[in-house]
Amino acid sequence: MASTAITRADSRFVEKDRLAVAASLFLLLFLLFSAVPLSLLPDPIGNNAPQFEEGVRTTVLLTFFSGAGGLLIGVALALATGSNRRWLRAPARMLVAVLRGTPLLVQILFVYLGLPSLVPSLTLSAFASALLALTLNVGAYNGEVIRGALAAIPIGQTEAALALGLRAGQTLLLVKAPQALRLAMPGLVNNLIALAKDSSLAYTIGVVELTNVGNRIASSSFLPVPILLTTAAVYFVITAMIAWTAGALDDRLSSRVAAR
């Protein structure tokens, strides 16, 4: 009976993995060829499908690169804010407080307009400015999620690892990090989904992403309702595929932790 239960559990995980792969492939195909299904819709959507496709690609690029950079920054901030060294902990906490306590729109405008006025050599393009601001912002939120996950691991595991002769770095990498990843996964996925939607603020500095494209078409066609509905539907597809894939990964991590 036990072997049968394990086999059924494994088959469920395999099925979820297949669904996650299918969702990822669907998202990739949608990003590359979104103009094809959108062109089948009535005007003003069908005749502007290539513009929507360009906006979708820019939105996903912003989400992917800022999400990856934000994860790295989050790890660094989590380690810094949890450090015993005050000179490292205090600036990191201040940076997190500023990034979480000010509007993302203000941060985008500051990077695009404020930095060049303070340091002319730091003049960035609209896309690079949005990417930097989004990366720093989501990095601050990720840092708090990861710090909380690391703090939730019982201190006894760290003491046991050190007693076995592992160094502090080895304990962090081999003992705490795998468990922290499992605990932090829901929060990190939530931040990534929020990031995909927050990337729409990049239109304020002229980045031609999905919201910017929708606003332009709505202004020229004087038909805002179908444009807004289409824009919202595309965002829903992107975030749903992210949640679906991440959910399968979370289940896989849970199964491995349970197996141990």
Image (cartoon, grey):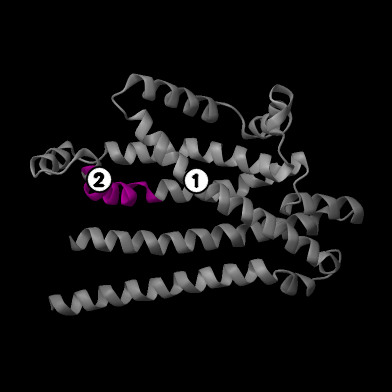
Q: Residue at x 33, y 50 (%)?
A: 181
Q: Is residue 82 above or below residue 138?
A: above
Residue 176, numbered label: 2
* First in sequence: mark 1 vs mark 2: 2
Distance from the alpha carbon under mark 1 to that under mark 2: 22 Å
Q: Position of residue 61 (x, y in %)?
A: 63, 55
User: Which SS type dominates the magenta stretch?
Assistant: helix
Q: Which residue is mark 1?
A: 191
Quadrant, the C terminus: bottom left
Q: Residue at x 19, y 63 (%)?
A: 259
Q: Residue at x 54, y 37 (%)?
A: 136
Q: Residue at x 31, y 60 (%)?
A: 253
- Image quadrant assignment for residue 45: bottom right
Left or right of 29, for residue 150: left
Quadrant, the N terminus: bottom left
Q: Magenta stretch containing residue 52, yes or no?
A: no
Q: Position of residue 70 (x, y in %)?
A: 50, 43
Residue range (magenta): 171-185
Q: Position of residue 216 (x, y in %)?
A: 84, 51
The answer, for residue 149, to whether it is visible in the render is yes
Helix, strand or loop at mark 2: helix
Labels 1 and 2 touching (C-beta < 8 A): no
Amino acid beneath label 2: Lys
- Image quadrant assignment for residue 102: top right
Circle 1 Cα neighbour tier, 10 Å, few/some/many (<14 / 14–19 / ≥20): many
Q: Position of residue 129 (x, y in %)?
A: 67, 39
Left or right of 121, for residue 144: left
Q: Is residue 136 above or below residue 127?
A: above
Helix, strand or loop at mark 1: helix
Q: Magenta stretch containing residue 180, yes or no?
A: yes
Amino acid beneath label 1: Asn
Left or right of 256, for residue 21: right
